[in-house]
Image (cartoon, rainbow, N blue to C red):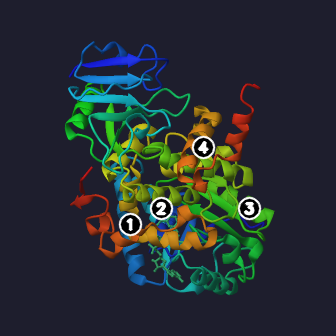
Amino acid sequence: MRYSISQRGESSSFPPGDAFLAGASAGGEVAIHLGTPIKIDATKAAILVELGTECLGVHTGEKAGEEGSNVLGFARYRNGRDAPSQLIELVRQPHTRPEAIAAAKVVFEAAGLVVVVCSDQAGRIIDRLVRPKYNAALRFLDEGLATAKDMDLTCRLGLGYPDGPIERVERGGLAYHHDVTAALFAVTGAAAYAPARRAVVARQRDGKE
Amino acid sequence: MSKPIETVAVCGAGGTMGAGIAIVCARAGFRTICHDVADESLDRALRQTGNFFAKSVERGKMQAADKNAVMGRLSRTTALADLADADLVIEAVFEDLGVKRALFGRLDKVCPAHTMFASNTSTLSITEIAAGSGREDRVVGLHFCLPAQLMRLIEVSPGINTSDATLRTAWAWCEKAGQLPVRTQDKPGFILNALLIPFLNDCIRAVEAGVAAPADIDTAIKGGLGYRMGPLELIDLIGLDTQVRLCEAFYPITLDPRAAAPPLLRRMVAAGLLGRKSGRGFFTYDAGKMFGA
Ligand SMILES: NC(=O)c1ccc[n+]([C@@H]2O[C@H](COP(=O)([O-])OP(=O)(O)OC[C@H]3O[C@@H](n4cnc5c(N)ncnc54)[C@H](O)[C@@H]3O)[C@@H](O)[C@H]2O)c1
């Protein structure tokens, strides 16, 4: 399936030079927006809008649970400064057209990406689930539970993770973690998402390095 | 504690963790006393241990002679009095404060003064387990990972009254046993479970909140973060009933809402969906094959 891309600024999912950008062709059945406002077009198989921390509803508007069309949100999961992963979180609304979901999957999977579908909730799947864990690890570090090295080692050896929570959140950027969790906290009000002290410090120090 | 550790006793050696810990001890050259209240559990565990080492020989990881030597270092008993020779006792009995305290209390009368007591508890406090043992300074937390015979990590936690000498001896023992100790404070769940249990609950809540299907959540976590196993597949392996019990141990102490058992988890347990062991949890299993992923 052919896809077109309209882009403004740098995309976090597809940084400059990414092969996916080169695969686009004008007038494709799927229209992809990277930082540009969406154009409603019911003739498109799917219209895909790249999301940051915001919900898809910000782009489409919402109608008391009746929302849904051929417009989907997406983000290629990326831990801040880390290179993007191969995983696409595809965001749907209650009445999103199944054919639009199928078309989006075809486009991304043809590019070798892995696609999961989620509803339009804050943090999608991964950030919703891992950011509270990074917050907890950062708090444990402050409270002296263990050293950063030992916490990371425990997660790698005890749970088989490729990296531990502290090394991962630091590599991705503590200020970035602050921004992601602040957005989640604004929506959920759950203490687990309140940015950890070390993330707040990193954000406040911005530019001081 | 000048006497070197030569003999280790494992209480609860008929159980999952105790059997694995006994393997670690015997393999590292310690004379190992396997103790359990249930004779038939010891039978089963020692049979499995024999099979484990037989496989190691088959795979060329161990010489047949070494296997015999290791098996020869293992002895078994249901009588606590037989633990009088132990320099170190590691308990891996039921996760129940009363049971663990009673065991240490009785052991205090059986074991000589130099014997160090270690607890493999996942969620209880080392200080609370040690209290009333009569040797609070010689009690330490040694939390092995499942399966203990394959996982090198041990979380080492001193209680409030644990002496520096006990901590040093325990640390050195872990290294001598070929394990990798990490130091943690005596706080609920130490590092591993303090991070894992609330995370797994969050994943269950995400299913309940309709964020995504279990298979999509697992794919996302594996694909996005590189975890080897998806969190919902892991809960199925741990057992949903076990996860409820872990939450019930955790939440009242921490009052962390993330540690509370999610309503969906309780409903699934009530419906008999316990995970792999019942054939169905977040996924459906048939003779080791997994559906729904
Ligand atoms: N299963 C895990 O993943 C895991 C991981 C790390 C730590 N732990 C901890 O290890 C301990 C044991 O867990 P398990 O999963 O192996 O349990 P289990 O039920 O498989 O084994 C417990 C064994 O203890 C025996 N036992 C009970 N009371 C006893 C007593 N007073 N004296 C001697 N033996 C007694 C039982 O007969 C049983 O064989 C718990 O404290 C648990 O929190 C479990």
Identify the element where label 1 is drawn: helix
Q: CA distance from mark 2 to mark 1?
A: 49 Å
Circles 3 and 2: CB atoms closer than 8 Å: no
Q: Is residue A38 above or below residue B213?
A: above
**Dot 3 and dot 4 within a common chain:** no
Separation (CA) of disc 3 from disc 1: 41 Å
- The residue type indicated by label 1 comes to Leu
Instruction: Read off the chain for label 3.
Output: B
Say whether mark 1 and mark 2 are on the same chain: yes
Numbered disc 3: secondary structure: helix
Residue situated in front as seen by the camera: A16 or A68: A68
Label 3 with label 4: CB-CB less than 8 Å: no
Asked if ligand 1 lies within 8 A of label 1, the reply is no
Image: A186 above or below B120 = above
User: Which chain does tag 1 point to?
Assistant: B
Where residue A54 appears, x then y in whole percent? 48, 38
Q: Look at the numbered discs 1 and 4 and tell me whether their residues touch, using CB distance below 8 Å.
A: no
Q: Residues within 10 Å of mark 4 (few under 14, many from 20)?
A: many
Disc 2 residue type (three-letter): Ala
Q: Residue A124 is drawn in which quadrant? A: top left
Marks 1/4: CA–CA distance: 27 Å
The chain under label 2 reads B
What kind of residue is marked 4? Ala
